[in-house]
Image (spheres, rainbow, N blue to C red):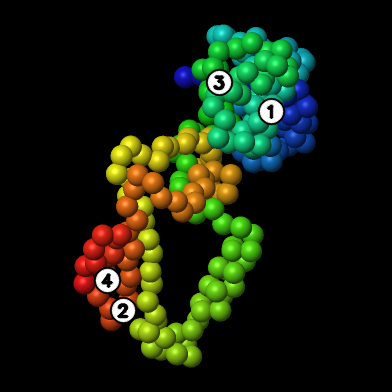
């Protein structure tokens, strides 16, 4: 199992200061967001050496420093659709750091991002988003004043089915529960060519129908 991140010297000094003030290991860990074994190790090392330096760490040293890690995260936030290869090239050009693409991927994942297929969502303008929000707010509680309102509403939608090939998939680096944030979706627009558009409708008291450009099903 790999070791955790190096605890900074200011934090190690704070651990000793809090301990000298009579705080328990649990209280120190809670204040500094450190695990109890980590607090114990810092105190033990201080008692043995008399200084705040950590002991040499076993294993392979980190390839990327914190500055490079921050630069990688900044590039992800600017454009999460970049590949690790593209990010690696930019890091090399801007910082002169030469590492493998796998090292870049490891850094990205260590900072909480994972590679996922971008969700396909219609491209909406700011005006469209505002109108949709106003519509939802207007009818949010309509059933309170008009119990039969939704019985008189028909919902429609359309979908494009590709005849040959596919629309392609774009991958994106994102954190959990951020799939629908604007920068993490693959915006789509309506267009034809090599596909069949299908339209449907449904309501509480309506049978749904399907219609394409060739025939209609009742």
The x, y position of residue 75, in whole percent, is 65, 31
Q: Earlier in the sequence, mark 2 or mark 1?
A: 1
Give the residue at x 66% y 37%: 78
> Where 55 sits versus 23, above or below?
above
Camera-side residue of 87 and 62? 87
Instruction: Identify the mark at residue 70; answer none if there is no mark.
Output: 1
**Residue to which mark 3 is pinned:** 85
Left or right: residue 116 compared with residue 68: left
Q: Is residue 121 visible?
A: no
Q: Earlier in the sequence, mark 3 or mark 4?
A: 3
**Residue to which mark 4 is pinned:** 208
**Disc nearest the viewer among 4 and 1:** 4
The x, y position of residue 163, in whole percent, is 29, 44
Give the residue at x 36% y 39%: 166
**Residue to which mark 2 is pinned:** 204
SS class, disc 4: strand
Q: CA distance from mark 3 to mark 4?
A: 47 Å
The x, y position of residue 149, in whole percent, is 42, 86
Q: Residues within 10 Å of mark 2 (few under 14, many from 20)?
A: few
Give the residue at x 41% y 89%: 147
- Marks 3 and 1 close (CB-CB < 8 Å): no
Q: Earlier in the sequence, mark 4 or mark 1?
A: 1
Give the residue at x 54% y 43%: 184
Left or right: residue 18 compared with residue 188: right
Left or right: residue 25 compared with residue 191: right
SS class, disc 1: helix
Q: Residues within 10 Å of mark 1 (few under 14, many from 20)?
A: some
């Amino acid at each position: 199992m790999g070791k955790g991140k190096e605890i900074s010297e200011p934090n190690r000094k704070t651990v000793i200061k809090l301990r000298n003030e009579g705080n328990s290991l649990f209280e120190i860990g809670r204040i500094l967001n450190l695990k109890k074994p980590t607090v114990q190790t810092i105190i033990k090392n201080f008692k043995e050496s008399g200084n705040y330096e950590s002991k040499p760490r076993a294993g392979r040293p980190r390839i990327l420093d914190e500055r490079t890690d921050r630069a990688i995260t900044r590039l992800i936030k600017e454009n999460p659709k970049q590949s690790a290869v593209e990010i690696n090239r930019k890091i090399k050009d801007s910082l002169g750091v030469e590492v493998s693409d796998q090292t870049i991927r490891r850094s990205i994942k260590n900072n909480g991002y994972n590679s996922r297929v971008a969700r396909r969502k219609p491209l909406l303008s700011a005006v469209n988003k505002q109108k949709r929000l106003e519509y939802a707010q207007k009818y949010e509680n309509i059933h309170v004043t008009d119990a039969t309102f939704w019985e008189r509403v028909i919902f429609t939608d359309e979908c494009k089915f590709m005849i040959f090939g596919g629309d392609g998939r774009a991958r994106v680096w994102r954190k959990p529960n951020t799939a629908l944030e604007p920068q993490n979706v693959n915006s789509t627009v309506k267009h034809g060519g090599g596909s069949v558009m299908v339209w449907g409708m449904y309501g509480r008291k309506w049978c749904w129908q399907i219609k394409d450009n060739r025939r209609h099903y009742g």
